[in-house]
Image (spheres, helix red, strand yellow):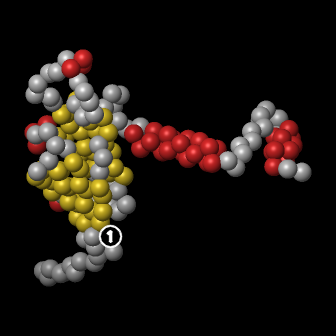
Amino acid sequence: MDNKQFFEELASKNSGIEPAYVSSEPEADLARASSVAKRTHHAISDDQEVGDGELIIDAYQTANEVIIEVPIAGVNADDLDISITPETVNIKGKRERSNHVKSDDYIYQECYWGRFSRSIVLPHEVDAEEADASLKNGVLTIKLPKLNRMKSTKLKVKGS
């Protein structure tokens, strides 16, 4: 029994399920990868508002903090809205164009202008109260100190 027959037989035993067979050709592998990428993209961007552009980020960690770097050239610090919980960081803002060009005059139009947002799920809980954000040379850097739930604190007992 070949793969196609196996899946057809398997599907016929489960009523309501149509058999599907994908060959092992490179095009099929590419189609599967593309499908996964589309599902992953939608899962990442579900928190975005409709019409928002999505930011690209670099996120890494040290022993004591999670650091997020976001290239956002052309955005003023006052145009950014960053909210932090122990588990997530949400970045919203707007990149405004200073001059307006007619669409017929463009040779290339690759830059995104308008509202953008990005939600980032963090790998560790962070101390949102101690977080720090800076904007330098068009790169937003957010430093998030990790919470250490295992850290113990000595408590002194006061006598009467």
The picture places residue 71, in percent across and down from the top left corner, at: 21, 48
The picture places residue 36, in percent across and down from the top left corner, at: 54, 45
Identify the amino acid type marked 1.
Arg
Q: Quadrant of residue 27?
A: top right
The count of marks equals 1
The residue singled out by tag 1 in the image is 149
For the question of whether residue 86 can be seen, the reply is no
The picture places residue 13, in percent across and down from the top left corner, at: 86, 41
Q: Which residue corresponds to the image point at 18% horizontal and 81% vertical from the top-left? A: 156
Q: Is residue 48 rendered to the left or right of residue 33?
A: left
Q: Which residue corresponds to the image point at 14% horizontal and 21% vertical from the top-left? A: 100
Q: Nearer the viewer, residue 13 or 114?
A: 114
Q: Nearer the viewer, residue 113 or 48?
A: 113
For the question of whether residue 1 can be seen, the reply is yes
Q: Is residue 19 rendered to the left or right of residue 137?
A: right
Residues packed near mark 1 inside 10 Å, few (<14), some (14 to 19) or many (20 plus): few
Residue 103 versus residue 72 in the image, above or below: above
Q: Nearer the viewer, residue 14 or 115?
A: 115
Q: Quadrant of residue 67?
A: bottom left
Q: Quadrant of residue 50?
A: top left
The quarter of the rendered structure image containing the C terminus is bottom left
Q: Which residue corresponds to the image point at 86% horizontal and 44% vertical from the top-left? A: 5
- Farthest residue in the front direction? 107
Q: Nearer the viewer, residue 27 or 144?
A: 27
Q: Is residue 123 rendered to the left or right of residue 27?
A: left
Q: Which residue corresponds to the image point at 89% horizontal and 51% vertical from the top-left? A: 1
- Farthest residue in the right direction? 1
Q: Secondary structure at mark 1?
A: loop
The picture places residue 149, in percent across and down from the top left corner, at: 32, 70
